[in-house]
């Protein structure tokens, strides 16, 4: 599948810095291939694209947040080895139906969905929607923005199950495709992947 024809309109470029942001505007837009080149030549950065075409650059996470992300990634990887499917890290970008490219902190894609593409195609951003994603709130994140991303980005684009995790306050929100949102308070428990990833369990006590 080729996605090189996608050209977001009115592209702008945003660099997040403390207490402010800087936007660089590309009046002619930026092709999908050019966006890929930007990402792949700056692998030290986390780069996303919004549906409007705005590009957002985020710095790497600190060890605290990175360790918590790794807990989810590790358990998903073990699940995928035993049950099939693909588990991905926070460095993987997904092209979504609204033309955005987003990077969840951890994600799982079914084998059937991944097999729609060749190995060569999977070296690019392709229209591949995870059935399950995890977003871990870092100390610099705003909860309201994170919640909006869960509904307006992930669930609106077809993700079936999503977890938004606030480790510091021991809160977790479960987002489902039917629009329901369940709040989990306290990390002295194990939660599961429901019917989306049957048999997957995660012990919240493993988080820092």
Image (cartoon, rainbow, N blue to C red):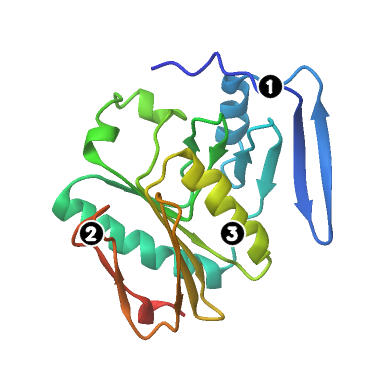
Return the disc, 3 or 1, that comes first in the chain's sequence.
1
Along the viewing direction, whichever of 168 and 18 lies nearer the viewer: 168
Q: Nearer the viewer, mark 3 or mark 2?
A: 3
Image quadrant of residue 9? top right
Residue 172 in percent (x, y) is at: 47, 71
- Asked if residue 136 is positioned above or below residue 85 in the image, the reply reads below
Q: Which mark is residue 78?
A: 2
Element at badge 2?
helix
Residue at (61% x, 54% y) in the render: 148
Above or below for 105 versus 23: below
Residue 41 visible in the shown view? yes
Does the rendering let one see residue 141? no
The mark nearer the N terminus, 1 or 2, is 1
User: Mark 3 highlights which residue?
Assistant: 147
Kindly report the distance in space between the C-alpha atoms of the residues bearing marks 3 and 2: 28 Å
Question: Which disc is residue 30 wearing?
Answer: 1
Q: Is residue 139 left or right of residue 21?
A: left
The quadrant holding residue 1 is top left
On the image, the x and y values in percent for residue 15 come to: 76, 46
Instruction: Tell me where residue 36 sits by quadrant.
Output: top right
Q: Dot 3 surroundings within 10 Å: few (below 14), some, or many (20 or more)?
A: some
Identify the mark nearer the N-term, 3 or 2.
Answer: 2
The residue located at (57%, 34%) in the rendering is 100
Mark 1 crowdedness (10 Å alpha carbons): few <14, some 14-19, many ≥20:
many
């Amino acid at each position: 599948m080729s996605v090189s024809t996608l050209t977001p309109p009115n592209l702008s470029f945003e660099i997040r810095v403390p207490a402010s942001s800087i936007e660089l505007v590309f009046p002619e837009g930026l092709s999908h291939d050019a966006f890929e080149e930007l990402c792949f030549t700056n692998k030290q950065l986390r780069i996303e694209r919004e549906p409007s075409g705005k590009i957002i650059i985020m710095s790497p996470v600190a060890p605290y947040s990175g360790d918590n992300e790794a807990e989810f990634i590790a358990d998903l990887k073990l699940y995928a080895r035993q049950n099939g499917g693909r588990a991905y890290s926070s460095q993987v970008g997904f092209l979504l139906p609204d033309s955005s490219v987003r990077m969840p902190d951890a994600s799982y894609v079914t084998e059937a969905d991944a097999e729609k593409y060749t190995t060569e195609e999977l070296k690019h951003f392709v229209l591949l929607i995870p059935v399950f994603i995890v977003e871990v709130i870092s100390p610099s994140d705003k909860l309201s923005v994170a919640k909006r991303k869960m509904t307006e980005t992930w669930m609106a684009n077809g993700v079936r199950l999503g977890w938004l995790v606030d480790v510091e306050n021991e809160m977790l929100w479960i987002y489902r495709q039917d629009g329901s949102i369940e709040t989990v308070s306290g990390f002295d428990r194990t939660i599961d992947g429901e019917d989306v990833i049957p048999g997957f369990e995660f012990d919240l006590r493993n988080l820092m």
